[in-house]
Image (spheres, grey):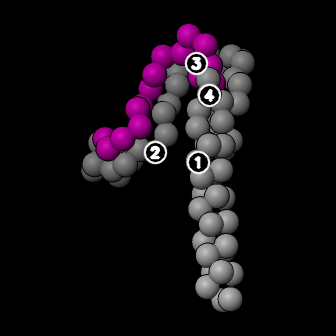
Amino acid sequence: MNSKADELVMLESEFIEQRLKWRLLLTTLPVEDALLGSLYGVRSDPIAGMRAMHEVVDFRIDNGTPVVVAADSVVLGAS
């Protein structure tokens, strides 16, 4: 009987992981007519001065430009 409970826990964990992936999937661009800044991927890190993974996409927009939520996400900074 314990193996059935373990199997259900594993299935629930897989379901939650899949649900999280869907919530993070971009469904639209967060801004219209924006110029791309830094792309997602390995690049030269301007602060550390070495190659590092950049895990976001940066957009260049004017102050006051409306931004919409494109997926469950967190704004890391604005300047």
Task: Give the labeled residue for mark 4.
Answer: 27
The answer for how far apart the CA atoms under marks 4 and 1 are is: 12 Å
**Viewport quadrant of the N terminus:** bottom right
Q: Which mark is residue 61?
A: 3
The answer for how far apart the CA atoms under marks 1 and 3 are is: 27 Å
Q: Amino acid at mark 3?
A: Ile
The residue lying at 60 percent from left, 71 percent from top is: 10
Task: Rate crowding at label 4 as few (under 14), some (14 to 19) or many (20 or more) other CA atoms within 10 Å.
Answer: few
Task: Give the labeled residue for mark 1.
Answer: 21
Question: Which sits earlier in the primary sequence, circle 2 or circle 3?
Answer: 2
Question: Which sits earlier in the primary sequence, circle 3 or circle 4?
Answer: 4
Which secondary structure, mark 4? loop
Q: Nearer the viewer, mark 2 or mark 1?
A: 1
Q: Is the magenta region chiefly helix, strand or loop?
A: loop
| The furthest residue to the bottom | 2
Q: Nearer the viewer, mark 2 or mark 3?
A: 2
Q: Amino acid at mark 1?
A: Lys
Closer to the camera in the image, 30 or 76: 30
Task: Give the labeled residue for mark 2.
Answer: 55
The answer for how far apart the CA atoms under marks 2 and 1 are is: 15 Å
Percent x, y of residue 66: 72, 18
Whether residue 46 is visible here, answered yes or no, is no
Quarter occupied by residue 11: bottom right
Task: Rate crowding at label 3 as few (under 14), some (14 to 19) or many (20 or more) other CA atoms within 10 Å.
Answer: some
Q: Which region of the structure is painted magenta?
A: 29-43
Question: Which sits earlier in the primary sequence, circle 4 or circle 2?
Answer: 4
Which secondary structure, mark 3? loop
Task: Rate crowding at label 2 as few (under 14), some (14 to 19) or many (20 or more) other CA atoms within 10 Å.
Answer: few
